[in-house]
Image (tube, rainbow, N blue to C red):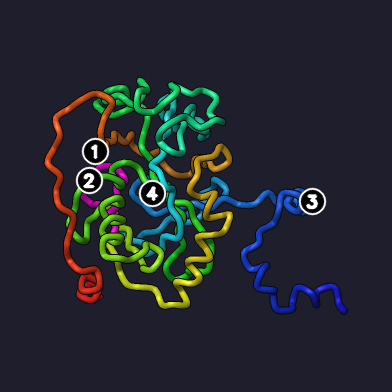
């Protein structure tokens, strides 16, 4: 048997989702890679190991959402953004949005709700110093079995109300669920809001996956890569591209409850249109 015969044979089913363990990575000199889709500057940017490798000129991108964090996370940076400095991990962060992560060395409070960095006005203008984030694990719609990317959404792309073709993520997820479907059963379009001064994306359903594609998407969502993508870790912090101009400061206006009491706004109803009919019309 030649030295390559073993690896040219059909791969056993149980090995299809198995990744390199820590020992093999260390011996092979491979620490693994981190792939992300960045929305900086209202452009879809493919980032690998902190280095920007592709910038899309399109205003929209079709993806399949294979995993998502169960909770909205939080991130706090003590220092203001400085384009001349390398990117660093947050000073404090929370994966569940309730308490600081155990690995955060500069925890600001024992819980997020009462934290002084969570009060409106603690950041620039009337924003909060601690920002909301929603982390997703996605694959490109035309390569469902390919690379898994981390997608991190800021508050303007998470909260709010829109029409059927301009839904922020939380509204979009609730709409798809209310129709009786899972997010990993369909192709989702992300599109930048042209009227927004900061990176803000809308979501809408495009089409359902085939059964074969859906089976692949389910397996992708169960992989260690997809599970790591929806967590905040120091290792996932990206470096800033050196050849690209620094983005403008984004002042986010979150639309969820604050620590201090305020007058409740009347909730707007979610879109009621049937998902199958909507996608048929768009197609």
Tag 2 or tag 1, which sits nearer the N-term?
Answer: 2
Image disc number at residue 160: 2
Q: Is mark 3 on a helix, strand or loop?
A: helix
Q: Is mark 4 on a helix, strand or loop?
A: loop
- The spot of residue 20 in percent (x, y) is 69, 56
Residue extending furthest toward the left = 266
- Report if the CB atoms under discs 2 and 4 are less than 8 Å apart: no
Tag 4 or tag 2, which sits nearer the N-term?
Answer: 4
Q: What element carries label 1?
A: loop
- The spot of residue 240 in percent (x, y) is 49, 40
Image disc number at residue 255: 1
Q: Which of 103 and 60 is in front in this view?
A: 103
Per the image, the residue denoted by label 3 is 27
Please report the residue visible at 24 percent of the width from the left and 26 percent of the height from the top.
Answer: 126
Q: Nearer the viewer, mark 3 or mark 4?
A: 3
Per the image, the residue denoted by label 4 is 39
Alpha-carbon span between mark 1 and mark 3: 48 Å
- Report if the CB atoms under discs 1 and 2 are less than 8 Å apart: yes
Span of residues in magenta: 193-203
């Amino acid at each position: 048997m030649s030295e390559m015969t073993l690896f040219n044979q059909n791969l056993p089913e149980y090995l299809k989702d198995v990744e390199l363990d820590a020992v093999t990575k260390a011996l092979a000199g491979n620490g693994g890679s981190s792939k992300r889709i960045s929305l900086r500057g209202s452009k879809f940017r493919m980032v690998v190991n902190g280095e920007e490798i592709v910038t899309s000129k399109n205003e929209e991108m079709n993806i399949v959402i294979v995993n998502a964090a169960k909770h909205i996370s939080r991130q706090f940076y003590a220092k203001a953004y400085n384009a001349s400095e390398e990117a660093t991990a947050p000073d404090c962060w929370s994966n569940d949005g309730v308490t600081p992560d155990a690995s955060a060395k500069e925890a600001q409070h024992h819980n997020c709700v009462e934290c002084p960095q969570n009060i409106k006005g603690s950041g620039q203008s009337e924003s909060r110093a601690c920002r909301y984030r929603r982390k997703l694990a996605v694959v490109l719609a035309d390569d469902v079995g390919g690379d898994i990317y981390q997608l991190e959404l800021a508050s303007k792309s998470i909260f709010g109300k829109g029409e059927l073709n301009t839904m922020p993520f939380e509204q979009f997820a609730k709409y798809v669920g209310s129709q009786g479907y899972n997010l990993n059963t369909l192709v989702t379009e992300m599109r930048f809001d042209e009227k927004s001064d900061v990176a803000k994306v809308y979501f809408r359903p495009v089409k359902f996956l085939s059964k074969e594609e859906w089976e692949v998407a389910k397996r992708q969502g169960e992989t260690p890569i997809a599970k790591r993508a929806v967590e905040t870790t120091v290792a996932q912090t990206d470096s800033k591209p050196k050849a690209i101009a620094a983005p403008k400061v984004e002042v986010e206006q979150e639309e969820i409850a604050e620590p201090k009491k305020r007058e409740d706004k009347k909730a707007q109803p979610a879109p009621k249109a049937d998902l199958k009919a909507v996608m048929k019309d768009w197609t």
